[in-house]
Every structure is written in structure tokens, then in C-alpha cells.
Amino acid sequence: MPIHKIRELRRAYGFDEVAIVPGDTTINPEQTNISFKLGELTFPIPIVAAAMDAVVDPGFAALFSKAGGLAVLNLEGVQTRYDDPDEAIAQIIQAPAEEVTTVLQRVYAEPIKEHLIGERVRAVKQQGGVCAASVTPANTKRFAPLVAEAGGDVLVVQSTVTTARHFSKSLRGLIFSELCQSVPIPVVVGNCVTYSAALELMRTGISGILVGVGPGATCTTRQVLGIGVPQITATMDCAAARDDYAKETGKYVAVITDGGVHSGADLCKAIAAGADAVMLGAMLARAEEAPAKGYQWGMASPHPALPRGKRIKVDTTGPLDKILFGPSTVADGTQNLVGALRTAMGVCGAATISQMHQVEIVVAPAIITEGKSWQLRQASSP
């Protein structure tokens, strides 16, 4: 009988399946340094606001920048399709649930107006903010120069899955090494979930990489395409590529975990798994200053042929300052995210983000229910 080699599955882990082990020493939380670098830029807090129309408009981007983070403006969304994007957002959030996908497709069918790209970037800059702008690979060659000319600080090239080697009908597609040389600002590329793809992307000269396929609150990529890797494993694999690339070249590429972070605990676990920062969508859509007033939808939700996302209601829970810095008035970890990170680092004895990368993580599949019978009982009560 012939012996057939059987494929084996590698176990991958998400946020709810692991826990951070406390350190042998501790440090005062206020003494921790949580800043992260992206190219030559340094940000006081390691939080990036996702390039989603429900989260970031020029006003929110400037406000988030002043708070110490980096907000990414979606240059292929309503901000560049409409002179009055608020009206388009109102159509989306007012649409009945059974019609919202059709409404999204109709709203995003409006052509992108290139003159609005520069206007939106300048609007962020005029309000004193650092401006990051997101484009898809298909439009990068056309839009990247417009971002740079308008004074943009960071260019984000983003799609569901991005690799350094993409085959298409185009004789000469997007080449990231050439892009990095042609624009005078840091380039962040996403999304990615594997060691090999991350390493190849880093070798093109990018400054940051987004990690995550399908974990977002509004994303249905895993349901529609069956593609994705749980975020702890994806972050650890891409962080390993970052570390190897740094040893190889001396250049450090920021790893940004994008999606699936629903609480301060998830943020802390992402950093412990090797992330330099996290990208948040739904959690920031709950801020009073977010443009969609408690609603959220993903970048792939309006796809004309294969939508991969839903509009969800996340509710407005407080001002941005409270979500980031507290004081928290809830016990579910959705407010005072910075305080949660500093406290976790203090308990682990980690004074910096890089030291937090070295703490021990254990597999803990029962961590969300262990010893929580009273909480679970009350949560299920009428």
C-alpha cells in the first residue's frame, strides 16, 4: 500500500485563547513609555484609528493626532466622493437593515473626485494634525503623489490581503520598492498574516505593516472567503519577521495589529504578542466625535460584486478622551485603553513596548470564564 503524507493543521490562537503572565518585577504604570515609531515619526500612544468612513474624517483625524495617536483617512471613501460627506453618511446610518448593503453600494458608486484628495489632507494639516491617508493598491500610483503634494505625513496602502508579489493583467503593477523611493513619507502596507509575506514586504523598504485578515467587528471576509488567521498567531508570526529583518538590515518596521481588538485586554495581548501598535475601528466609532454617531461599517462592505462587511451599531459611549485616557465608568475594558496598557506593562515589569514584547504568554482557553460564574449568571438573567 502506498503511504500518503497527510497534511497537518497548525494550531493558531486568538485573543480569547491566551493570557499574559505577570512579571517577576513590577513598575509604576506612569513610568512606562508606550510611544511607537513609524519611520522618522514618533507617536506618544500606540493606537491607530482605522481608515473607515464611520470613524475618521478630517476633524476626527486632527483630534486623534492631538491626543497622541495616528488616524488614517480613507481616500477612497465618502470623504473624496462627496463635497458633503456628512449627507452620504446620514444615508447609510438611516438605511433599514435589510437595505443597507444596497445603500452602501449605491453611495460608494459615486466616482472619486481627485481634487478632494488634496482638500481633505490639507484640512487635517490646517487643524494641526498629522495626516495618514489610505489608498488601495489599484489607485496608489495615481493618488500617492497627490497625498504627498498636499502635505500628507504617512501613506497607507491597504487591501484585504497584500503581498510583495502580485500577478495581474497589468504589464507593470504596483512595485512597493519603487513607491517607497518615489514618495518622501513613510509607507505602511497591509494587510498580512504570515511570516514569509511580511518579510518580503519589509524588504521592499516599507516603514510599517498592518496585520490582520478578517478579525474586524464589521468584516465578513472569514464568512465569505474562509480566509484569515487568528490575531495572536498572526501578530507573533509577523513580529518574528520584523525582528529577523531588523537583524538582517538594522531597519525596524512597525507591526500594527489591525482588527479584533475589543477591549483593553486585547490591546495588551496584541502588544505582548509583538505588535508595536494596534489599529482600532469599532472601539473608536463609539466616540462622540466619530462621524457616524455610533455606527460602523468596513472598507469592503460596499464592494459592488462581493461585499464583505456589515453595518453594525456600536452606540456612542463617551468622548474620545474618555475612551483613550479615562476615567472609565464601565468595567468591560472599553474605556481608558491607555491606562489598561500602562497597568499591564507595570504588572509585567515592562518599561517600554519592546520590553512588553518579551513577556510570557500562555495558552488559556478558559481565561474569559474562569472564576466568572456569578458574572455569567447575571449576564444571562432577564
Image (spheres, helix red, strand yellow):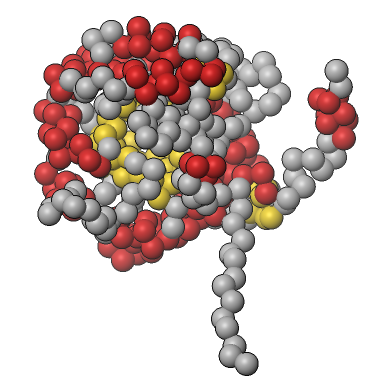
Location of the C terminus by quadrant is top right
- 118 vs 165, left or right, is left
Q: Residue furthest bottom?
A: 1
Give percent across and percent down for residue 233: 54, 54
Give percent across and percent down for residue 240: 45, 60
- Residue at (29, 32) in percent of width and height: 134
Give percent across and percent down for residue 310: 50, 27
180, above or below 281, in the image: below
Give percent across and percent down for residue 204: 23, 55
- Residue at (28, 18) in percent of width and height: 79
Return the residue nearer the eye: 37 or 310: 310
- Residue at (62, 61) in percent of width and height: 11
- Residue at (35, 31) in percent of width and height: 304
- 363 vs 229, left or right, is right
Return the residue nearer the eye: 196 or 296: 296
**Which quarter of the picture shows residue 200?**
bottom left
Return the residue nearer the eye: 81 or 28: 81
Location of the N terminus by quadrant is bottom right
Return the residue nearer the eye: 69 or 381: 381
Instruction: Tally the numbered discs.
Output: 0
Question: Is residue 148 shown to the viewer in this render?
Answer: no
Question: Is residue 114 shown to the viewer in this render?
Answer: yes
**Which quarter of the picture shows residue 277?**
top left
